Image: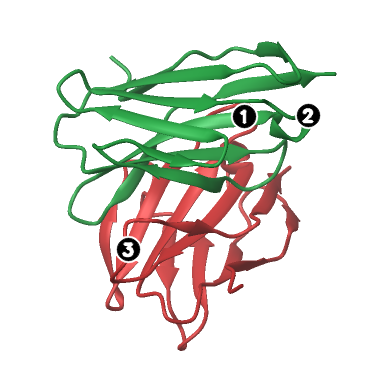
Chain colours: A green, B red
Amino acid sequence: RKEVEQDPGPFNVPEGATVAFNCTYSNSASQSFFWYRQDCRKEPKLLMSVYSSGNEDGRFTAQLNRASQYISLLIRDSKLSDSATYLCVVNIGSNYQLIWGAGTKLIIKP
Amino acid sequence: EPEVTQTPSHQVTQMGQEVILRCVPISNHLYFYWYRQILGQKVEFLVSFYNNEISEKSEIFDDQFSVERPDGSNFTLKIRSTKLEDSAMYFCASRGTGGNSYEQYFGPGTRLTVT
């Protein structure tokens, strides 16, 4: 079983739509959770940390369900600039190395 | 805004040669990491470094790899004898302490091409 699993996509979505990404992780000892976005051939950039209480940043909402080992990301009112690969990432171990999902590619169409 | 920098942006080398990839982490950060991403694949953890020593390493990080913090600002990854399968993007990351200390910030990467 993969440590962090995501739907590979791609998700083809019209501009303005709401998009939902889901992710599951296998290690119940995972401590911290993140969504990164990665543009083609660029470095991953931290989009948001994910907290048990859920958190929102503008159009982006992240949720964590520790019991189900499930993480989600919702993008509302999607923009063309949201086109990227969205990476679900968990933090394990005493040195906080990051374990990465393979990413879900998002394509926003005008 | 402070950022992680990496040099070179692209390195081409022949199989069997040694390469050194350089990183300058964010200045007040104490934890440093190397990751790699083979084209079309997911990001993979290589090694973490704290207090001038390796704190964790993955199975990928074998005897051909080493890391060093030669001075107060640079953090390097050395591959002693490169193989074709070492071709990948190599990302350096750093994180601080306090506040959002779990968050790691990435440099732009070095694209290593082994021919």
Check chain identity for marks 1 and 2: say if they share one. yes
Specify the label residue B68 is tagged with.
Answer: none
Distance from disc 1 to disc 3, alpha carbons, whole Å, reads: 24 Å
Q: Element type at marker 1?
A: strand
B5 or A57, which is in the foreground? A57
Tell me the amino acid under the disc marked 1. Thr
Question: In the picture, residue A98 is in which quadrant?
Answer: top left
x and y percent of residue B37 in the render?
56, 39
Residue B84 to residue B99: above or below: above
Residue identified by numbered label 1: A85
Q: Chain of mark 2?
A: A
Specify the label residue A80 is tagged with.
Answer: 2
x and y percent of residue A105 in the render?
63, 21
Tell me the amino acid under the disc marked 3. Ser
Q: Element type at marker 3?
A: loop
Give the crowd class for mark 3: few <14, some 14-19, many >=20 residues within 10 Å.
few
Q: Chain of mark 3?
A: B
Q: Is residue A52 left or right of residue B83?
A: left
* Residue displayed at 59% across by 12% down: A9
Distance from disc 3 to disc 2, alpha carbons, whole Å, reads: 31 Å
Single out the mark in the foreground, 1 or 2: 2
* Residue displayed at 52% across by 79% down: B74
A84 or B16, which is in the foreground? A84
* Residue displayed at 69% across by 38% down: A39
* Mark 3 and mark 2 residues within 8 Å of each other at the beta carbon: no
Q: Earlier in the sequence, mark 1 or mark 2?
A: 2
* Mark 1 and mark 2 residues within 8 Å of each other at the beta carbon: no
x and y percent of residue B10 in the render?
75, 55
Q: Is residue B20 left or right of residue A95?
A: right
Residue identified by numbered label 3: B101
